[in-house]
Image (cartoon, rainbow, N blue to C red):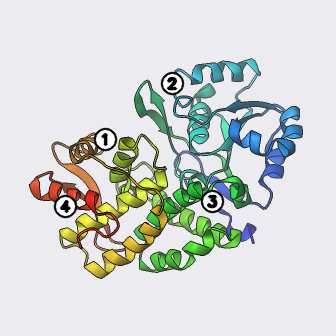
Amino acid sequence: MSECMDFTVRSAVHDYRVRFVDDGLAAIADYAGADDVILIDEKFVSIYKSRLRPLLEAHKHIALIASEEQKSYLQLAPVIETLIGKNFRKNNRLIVVGGGVIQDIGAFLAANLYRGVQWIFFPTTLLAQCDSCIGGKSSINFGRYKNQLGNFYPPHEIVIDPGLLDSLPELDVRSGLGEMIHFYLVSGLEDFHRIMADYERALNDHTVLQKLIARSLQIKKRVIEIDEFDRGERLLFNYGHSFGHAIESLTAYRVPHGIAVSYGMDLANYLSLQLGHINRPIYDQMHELLRCNWQGVELGPIDLESFIGALRKDKKNIGSEVVVILTKGPGQMFKSALPIHSQTTDWIRQWLSGRENPGV
């Protein structure tokens, strides 16, 4: 079943293959050559230490803490020094094992070491498996400025084993599902109905989850092959993210990314409702699925002025208006310059004060 889901992504940088496998840990050993270096999430090592021990004893490796502090320009200097000290050369490969933070680090290193080396990515979180593993975007932090240095340098191959998600807490799985919901809503009504039908089973059924992951990546593949460098159609994938990033920031990242995006999509839908782009039944349908996904993760009080201030800092903004993605329904997202005036702020205030059933 896994092989029929495999596919290739076309890229101006280099085409790359996505493979689904049944034993990701064994696949790491298959891919790692004698002089390759495995860059791996320290927490992942601790979870699978008995199975990984022979692999790591036999191969050069660097275990990193997957933190925003580690994903910084200065913190990567010792990693580069270690790689060079391990005699890593232009013809060697980086085998990168972890979630989004380790992916960002691996992509940045691979793109810049010797002007570019090959790297293979084994995503170990649902967010990475269903979204960030393809598309080529990566970024690292510079001091207190988040994601300011980056590039488009995709892996040469991506190997996905949904079985590696077994160790994730349910909240991390729902965070990944939030990102998937976003792709399914951007895709259209048929995909929206599909994820509505499969959502509950995906929490516990590997077969269902793997099919949803594969479809999520296919939705993204279709767009990034048209607009790889974020200049047009790919911008629609920012749906829910401008608001979600503000929520992440104002909750000091207590709210996981995909949960914050679920809230962000709901606010985008609510503003679309108020502006007359969608009707109440469509809003209610989307709201119910999103509410299920964020259930149990309360935002707590969020100051309206702080929220508006966080929105204004989004790097996609132009001038005094806030650039966001709104919707006319599933599959009908569009970019909009949202003026921040009394009516808009009043709608946002309504949403912030009544997220369970706003506007009623």
Q: Which residue is mark 2?
A: 73
Residue 347, labelled with which disc? 4
> Which image quadrant for residue 355?
bottom left
Distance between the Cα atoms at labels 1 and 4?
A: 23 Å
Q: Earlier in the sequence, mark 3 or mark 1?
A: 3
Say which element carries label 1: loop
Distance between the Cα atoms at labels 2 and 1?
A: 20 Å
Of residues 225 and 254, the one nearer the viewer is 254
Relative to 23, is 179 on the left or the right? left
> Which image quadrant for residue 211?
bottom right
Say which element carries label 4: helix
Q: Quadrant of the C terminus?
A: bottom left
Distance between the Cα atoms at labels 3 and 4?
A: 43 Å
Q: Nearer the viewer, mark 3 or mark 1?
A: 1
Q: Residue at x 24, y 67 (%)?
A: 272
Q: Which residue is mark 3?
A: 8
Q: Earlier in the sequence, mark 3 or mark 4?
A: 3
Distance between the Cα atoms at labels 4 and 2?
A: 40 Å
Q: Are marks 3 and 1 in contact (CB under 8 Å)?
A: no
Say which element carries label 2: loop
Relative to 253, is 99 on the left or the right? right
Dot 1 alpha-carbon crowd within 10 angstroms: few under 14, some 14 to 19, many 20 or more: few
Q: Which residue is mark 1?
A: 315
